[in-house]
Image (cartoon, rainbow, N blue to C red):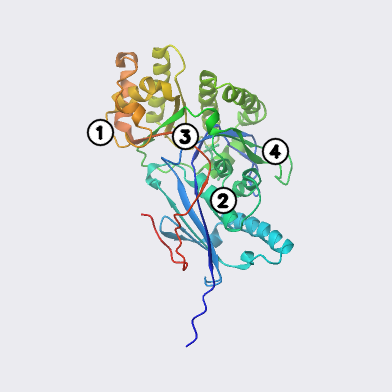
Amino acid sequence: MAAVSESPVYRATTTAPVNIAVIKYWGKRDATLNLPTNSSLSVTLSQRSLRTLTTASCSANYPAADELTLNGKSQDIQSSKRTLACLASLRAHRQELENADSSLPKLSTLPLRIVSENNFPTAAGLASSAAGFAALVRAVADLYKLPQSPTELSRIARQGSGSACRSLMGGYVAWRAGELADGSDSLAEEVASQGHWPEMRALILVVSAEKKDVPSTTGMQTTVATSELFATRANAVVPARMTAIETAIQNRDFPTFAEITMRDSNGFHATCLDSWPPIFYMNDVSRAAVRLVHDINNAAGRTVCGYTFDAGPNAVIYYLEKDSEVVAGTFRSILGTELEGWSGPFYDAVKNVGPGVSLDQVDSRAVDVLKTGLSRVILTGVGEGPVSVEDHLVGEKGEILSTQ
Ligand code: DP6
């Protein structure tokens, strides 16, 4: 009896990190190519706390249409222009390799099966699109053995989600807005490695929000079209801040880094408020976090922490490991250890510390609002870029596996 002929299943698996901007991307100069109105800069967060794991596979055994499964749910790729754009660019690069070397297997012609899982609940309210698209692009690029550098691949990830282009690298990453109409100079690059300033920590205060926010893609388009403050931010304010924060990072100058971070978050949310109709991402709980950060800095007599807020109410508070007691210790004393999230790989430095500042130096009303308004915290820090791993989510025969 003839054996059933089985074609090979090709696989590559990667992890990819979340990044949180300190200079915010907000506004598109070209919505189709997803080109930004201004440059932005982010800190890549450790994958020991938050990561997406993605396997890209291809095989002649698969059904003809590409498939994508996210957190156990099959996705309709055909309705996601962004995913289609990323896959088309990656296939075109593979095709170039195959055209140049006829001995290579024709992977560009095979259907893809991509399986992806986040190790953090979507309910945590953290945008997962950056890590998700970065992992998708990195995994398919690895499957296709593409020679392109992370910066070159950032051009592809950007089409999935702007902020995703910054998750292809670790440490401190700039996305240069670029000037060309075709977007070829709109690229992400590492401005400093994780090892240059490894002491950076982030405490994420996850706000229990019942209402869904305006999605960032829609929100930024409203801002560009209606805010009068916006042009000044994009043309004058952000370029100066990019230069200043890069210098602060090179010099490991935390007070300057934190002040620019806080001012840029405030400026971005000011353009949201200045949109018409106005957009509110921060709420009373977010504002309580702002108040407490300023109170802690005042009580410490120096800038030990800085906040930033994305298109939602969660606070991300940056601080240096040496100030764990004064920052994380104070927040832990305020919030209590019963709150979920006081654990994990970054907890050691916080476990045995008290409040680093006297609690009568912080606003008691802000303390009350914060205590009742959070669902959890996440303790993390600066981390590395995507990592190639062998924990495949697709088996040798093409079957979907799960780590959950
Ligand atoms: C506030 O990258 O989600 O987090 O390109 O439309 O997918 P699209 O937008 P997205 O926007 C992120 C906005 C932000 C700021 C930032 O990450 O720089």
Mark pair 4, 2: CA separation: 22 Å
Q: Which residue is mark 2?
A: 138
Which numbered disc, 3 or 2, marks the residue that appears first in the sequence?
2
Q: Residue furthest bottom?
A: 1
- Badge 1 amino acid: Glu
Q: Position of residue 64 (x, y in %)?
A: 56, 71
Residue drawn 53% across the image and 31% down it: 195
Q: Which residue is mark 1?
A: 338
Q: Which residue is mark 4?
A: 178
Mark pair 1, 3: CA separation: 30 Å
Q: Residue 268: tell me if it is visible.
A: no
Q: Which residue is mark 3?
A: 280
Which quadrant holds residue 191?
top right
Which numbered disc, 1 or 3, marks the residue that appears first in the sequence?
3
The residue carrying pointer 4 sits among few (fewer than 14), some (14 to 19) or many (20 or more) residues within 10 Å by Cα, namely some
Mark pair 3, 2: CA separation: 34 Å
Helix, strand or loop at label 4? It is: loop
Helix, strand or loop at label 1? It is: loop
Q: Position of residue 71 (x, y in %)?
A: 41, 55
> Looking at the image, which is closer to me, 70 or 279?
70
Image label count: 4
- Badge 4 amino acid: Gly
Q: Is residue 253 left or right of residue 240?
A: left
Q: Residue 2: tell me if it is visible.
A: yes
